[in-house]
Image (spheres, rainbow, N blue to C red):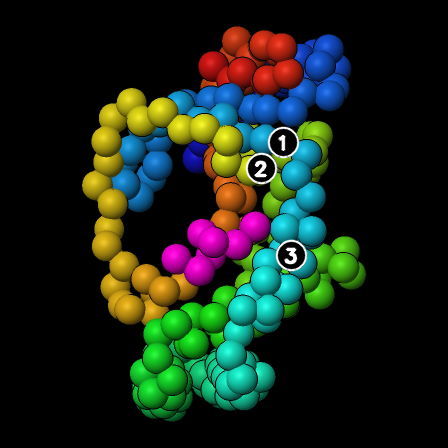
Amino acid sequence: MKSLPSPASLAALVSVIASSPSARFAGFTYRAKESGELARRTIILNADYGKLVSDSVTQIAAAAGSDFASDIATTKAMQANVKAFAVGSKERKAANAALNVMQAAIGAERAAAAELYISLADTQLAHAQGEQNAAYTKAGVYEDVRAGIKRHLVDGTYEVAGLAHSKVVLEAGTHKAPVSDKAIAKAALRRSLPIGKWRTFCLEAACLEGIRANGDTLEFA
């Protein structure tokens, strides 16, 4: 288990936030777990996540073709059919195969647009009700520290979230290539949307040691 933050580091965070309550940015060095890339990142805090999601849903719909409504209805029905069966069961595998066949028939771009729209629309509805998307796996495990910064209730790590502002790569990583045409299309579509700039990072409690306010930026050690 990760070590819990010391009282001193917690006090430092609270003190810096109190001294700079309107800070717009957070700067920190982050190593990506999947790729191993090390980069100095700056993100914009206080972004309206709900509006980013809503604007993205609208943008996908506005760019969609005449088959979009049908694609959504068919995809949702087939996704529900997959979820109706136990993980690893032959029935679930068959339902997944049927979904893949349908998506191959309509093409990667249409399949990606329908899947991403459904996911974002579910998030939009949940957000409007003050809840999380049902697929969100971190519900109830974080407490808010301030806009854009949350603390894990168990291991004391911190989640910092906001809009990507700048990135300086310090050590290159190894990035996995998308596994399918649909994955490539979905990644490209997401990057083109307002939500595509949203980033979430998990920082160890040790990053709080030496935290300081640098103008309008909270600088994590």
Horizontal arrangement in the rendering, residue 16 relative to residue 201 (left or right): right
Q: Which mark is residue 73?
A: none
Please say if 59 is above or below 145: below
Tags 1 and 2 touching, CB below 8 Å = yes
Q: Which residue is mark 2?
A: 162
Q: Which residue is mark 1?
A: 45
Res 128 quadrant in image: bottom right
Q: Amino acid at mark 3?
A: Asp
Q: Which residue is mark 3?
A: 55
Residue in view at x 52 percent, y 12 percent: 209
Where does the magenta region start and end? 188-194
Please say if 151 is above or below 136: above
Residue in view at x 51 percent, y 18 percent: 220
Helix, strand or loop: magenta stretch: helix
Residue 92 seen in this snapshot: no
Q: Residues within 10 Å of mark 1 (few under 14, many from 20)?
A: many
**Percent x, y for residue 194?**
56, 50
Q: Amino acid at mark 1?
A: Leu
